[in-house]
Image (cartoon, rainbow, N blue to C red):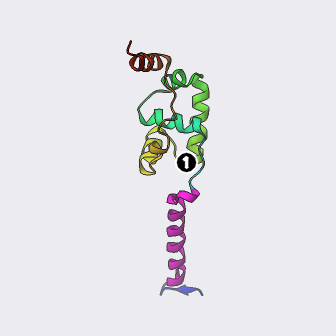
Amino acid sequence: MRTQDCCGRDLIDNQSINWVIEAYRSQATALTSPRTQPRLSPKELAIITCITQGKRNKEIAYQLGTTEQVIKNYLRKVYDKLGVSDRLELALYCLHHQLHKKAAGTVPATNAQATEALAANTGK
């Protein structure tokens, strides 16, 4: 049904407004629902963990035994999956959706960290 005001401009009826509001609500619910969260690989989760710890791509690459370019490629993929555009948005998204808890333990230790842990466990 089309409604116009006194000057002939089209008005939106209440039913259409309610439909738009409901569409936004269901979209917001879908985005925050755990069932609809995108699946992230263990490597993506490891990179996310490093990002939330404030590490740079070069540090992440060293820790994961890969190149900086590979990390950049993974980050672009993660940004697209999660609908974020930069590291800050990614970190905030992860904190809001508690991805940092899911990613715990996915970051391998560097050689120095592994050596320290081994020395601590063997008493050397």
Q: Inspect the magenta stretch and tell me whether residue 53 lies in it.
A: no
In the image, taking residue 115 as reference, residue 68 lies left or right, namely right
At label 1, the amino acid type is Leu
Q: Position of residue 55 (x, y in %)?
A: 44, 28
What range of the chain is rendered magenta?
9-36
Q: Residue at x 41, y 31 (%)?
A: 54
Residue at the front extreme, as displayed: 122
Is residue 8 visible in the rendered structure shown here?
Answer: no
- Residue holding disc 1: 82
Q: Residue at x 54, y 24 (%)?
A: 61
Is residue 119 visible in the rendered structure shown here?
Answer: yes
In the image, taking residue 96 as reference, residue 71 lies left or right, namely right
Q: Position of residue 71 (x, y in %)?
A: 57, 29
Front one among 11 and 69? 69
Q: How many marks?
A: 1
Which quarter of the rendered picture does the N terminus lie within? bottom right
Q: Is residue 77 above or below residue 37?
A: above
